[in-house]
């Protein structure tokens, strides 16, 4: 079974302007991810943790468009490879343009729930970047800022925080001594509640720096520090 989620928001610009910002590759390169047009006409984006190839299934200029995106994840990000569909509807309202984004292609199970949770968070951040761009004219893609270091663990968001699922040897997490089941609560002196804090940390701290962390294991608060490193290639077991 495929699950769907939807977001509706209003931006104070005419429909024509909102449409251009979301469909013109030159505009997308300003506020969204770096994109390129492939030979078959699809749009390709490659960012930290994932690669996306999108094809337009349907488009009515100024009213709606629908795309299908093939997503390839990378180790350590908990991204589930697969296919997603997105429909974007534009409506003229007194305040400007009401935009409704619907995404589908999320299945059942813990892995897919984590993937959908990450997609919702990512969409919310992307919408914030879009609204900033349209309403102020300033392009500052906060959702896309490359990593300077790599944490080295896969995790899932749980009610208590961020739970480690696996650790890649030879990385910061491996040197720190993290294990599956640990709940990371602090990194670099800042509180950790989920993936967002980890992402911001990787964008601000470079490989070679020493960083401290705190985590909970078997009912005890543990602390340690280790040197940050770059992303390592994933080798077969």
Image (cartoon, rainbow, N blue to C red):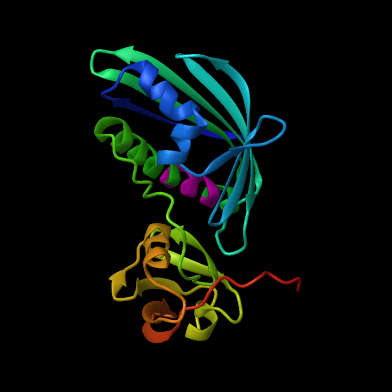
Task: Tell me the residue at 45%/14% (across/down).
Answer: 62
Task: Tell me the residue at 46%/36% (across/down).
Answer: 28
In the picture, measured across the screen, residue 61 lies left or right of residue 142, that is right
Closer to the camera in the image, 91 or 104: 91
Closer to the camera in the image, 160 or 76: 76
Closer to the camera in the image, 63 or 20: 20
In the picture, measured across the screen, residue 34 lies left or right of residue 98, that is right
- Residue 85's place in the image compared with 229, above or below, is above
Occupied quadrant, residue 39? top right
**Please, which residue is most extreme toward the front here?**
26
- Residue 215's place in the image compared with 24, above or below, is below
- Residue 182's place in the image compared with 112, above or below, is below
Q: Is residue 84 located in the magenta-colored stretch of the structure?
A: no
- Residue 93's place in the image compared with 132, above or below, is above
Q: Report x, y in % for residue 71.
A: 63, 45
Quarter of the image with the N terminus is: top right
In the picture, measured across the screen, residue 12 lies left or right of residue 48, that is left
Task: Tell me the residue at 62%/63% (across/down).
Answer: 75
Quarter of the image with the C terminus is: bottom right
Magenta residues, dominant SS class: helix
Q: Report x, y in % for residue 91.
A: 37, 14
Looking at the image, can residue 5 be seen? no
Q: Is residue 115 located in the magenta-colored stretch of the structure?
A: yes
The residue stretch that appears in magenta = 114-121
């Amino acid at each position: 079974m495929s699950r769907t989620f939807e977001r509706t928001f209003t931006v104070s610009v005419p429909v024509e302007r909102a449409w251009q910002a979301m469909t013109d590759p030159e505009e997308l390169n300003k506020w969204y991810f770096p994109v390129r047009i492939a030979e078959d006409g699809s749009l390709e984006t490659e960012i930290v943790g994932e690669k996306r190839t999108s094809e337009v299934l349907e488009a009515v200029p100024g009213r709606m468009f629908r795309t299908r995106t093939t997503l390839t994840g990378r180790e350590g990000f908990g991204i589930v490879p697969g296919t997603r569909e997105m429909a974007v509807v534009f409506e003229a309202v007194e305040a400007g343009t009401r935009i409704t984004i619907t995404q589908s292609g999320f299945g059942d199970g813990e892995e897919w729930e984590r993937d959908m949770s990450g997609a919702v968070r990512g969409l919310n951040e992307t919408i914030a970047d879009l609204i900033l761009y349209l309403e102020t004219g300033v392009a500052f893609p906060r959702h896309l800022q490359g990593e300077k270091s790599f944490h080295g663990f896969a995790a899932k968001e749980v009610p208590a925080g961020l739970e480690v699922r696996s650790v890649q040897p030879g990385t910061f997490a491996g040197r720190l001594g993290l294990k599956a089941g640990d709940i990371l609560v602090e990194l670099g002196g800042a509180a950790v509640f989920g993936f967002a804090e980890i992402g911001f940390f990787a964008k601000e701290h470079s490989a070679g720096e020493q960083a401290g962390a705190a985590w909970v294991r078997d009912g005890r608060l543990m602390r340690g520090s280790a040197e940050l490193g770059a992303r390592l290639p994933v080798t077969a077991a």
